[in-house]
């Protein structure tokens, strides 16, 4: 008898409202992403982040997203927000990422000529590698997919798949890539920075159904 594939973990990123965070958790999300990058329409203040953290309780993984932040900026957030995992979307090297004594994820923006395995090797200490679409000047949240065939099967067990995922395509993405987790932001929004709770529920249900 064939073994049923493990369902990937689910992260809803770019949460700005505690009610949306609670809805995502109650619907089955494993992790909530909080963006600490001021230019993003999904950016949150430390105060907002604390409210969201308190609303979801201690057993939801809180992921803090940063883009080439000064180390003291990251430390300031860590002193006030109980983040479990850090996610870096800029040009941070491995030495930068490891200094905060937290598990961390490095985002790689995938171009047609990206040597994914080589790029991952530079971040061997990462807890995971998030693969996202490349768009000039945009560090993440592009809302665009990329060619999933660029991802070698040998590394998919450590991949967090992002980039243009939504309730309609996530099941196909999971069956194609077989990532350890999926990450969505714009695909469950009614407008940049404003989550659509119906889309969040639909996305999570599509992930659950992908292994059937």
Image (spheres, rainbow, N blue to C red):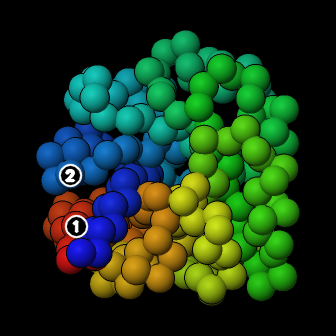
Q: Residue at x 64, y 64 (%)?
A: 155
Between 171 and 32, the residue placed more toward the observer is 171
Q: Position of residue 94 (x, y in %)?
A: 81, 39
Check whether the beta carbons of the residues at disc 1 and disc 2 lie within 8 A of each other. yes
Residue under circle 2?
A: 28
Q: Quadrant of the C terminus?
A: bottom left
Q: Which of the two discs, 1 and 2, sits closer to the camera? A: 1
Residue under circle 1?
A: 208
Please tell me in which quadrant of the rendered image residue 114 appears: bottom right
Between 183 and 44, the residue placed more toward the observer is 183
Q: Earlier in the sequence, mark 1 or mark 2?
A: 2
How many marks on residues?
A: 2
Q: Quadrant of the N terminus?
A: bottom left
Describe residue 117's horizontal placement relative to residue 167 as left or right. right
Please tell me in which quadrant of the rendered image residue 134 appears: bottom right
Between 184 and 193, the residue placed more toward the observer is 184
Q: Residue 21, relative to residue 188: is it above or below? A: above
Describe residue 53's horizontal placement relative to residue 116 as left or right. left
Please tell me in which quadrant of the rendered image residue 184 appears: bottom left
Could you say which disc has been placed on residue 52 in the image?
A: none
Disc 1 secondary structure class: helix
């Amino acid at each position: 008898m064939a073994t049923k594939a493990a369902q990937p973990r689910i992260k809803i990123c770019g949460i700005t409202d505690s009610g949306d965070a609670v809805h995502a958790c109650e619907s089955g999300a494993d992790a909530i992403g909080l963006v600490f990058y001021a230019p993003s329409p999904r950016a949150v203040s430390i105060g907002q982040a604390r409210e969201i953290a308190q609303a979801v309780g201690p057993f939801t993984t809180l992921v803090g997203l940063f883009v080439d932040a000064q180390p003291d900026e990251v430390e300031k957030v860590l002193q006030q927000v109980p983040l479990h995992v850090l996610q870096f979307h800029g040009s941070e090297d491995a030495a930068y990422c490891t200094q905060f004594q937290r598990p961390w994820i490095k985002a790689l923006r995938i171009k047609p000529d990206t040597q994914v395995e080589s790029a991952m090797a530079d971040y061997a200490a990462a807890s995971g590698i998030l693969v996202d679409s490349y768009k000039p000047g945009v560090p993440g949240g592009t809302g665009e997919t990329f060619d999933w065939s660029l991802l070698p099967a040998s590394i998919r067990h450590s991949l967090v798949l992002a980039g243009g995922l939504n309730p309609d395509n996530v099941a196909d993405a999971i069956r194609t890539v077989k990532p350890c987790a999926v990450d969505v932001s714009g695909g469950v929004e009614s407008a940049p920075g404003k989550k659509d709770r119906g889309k969040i529920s639909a996305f999570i249900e599509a992930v659950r159904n992908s292994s059937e």
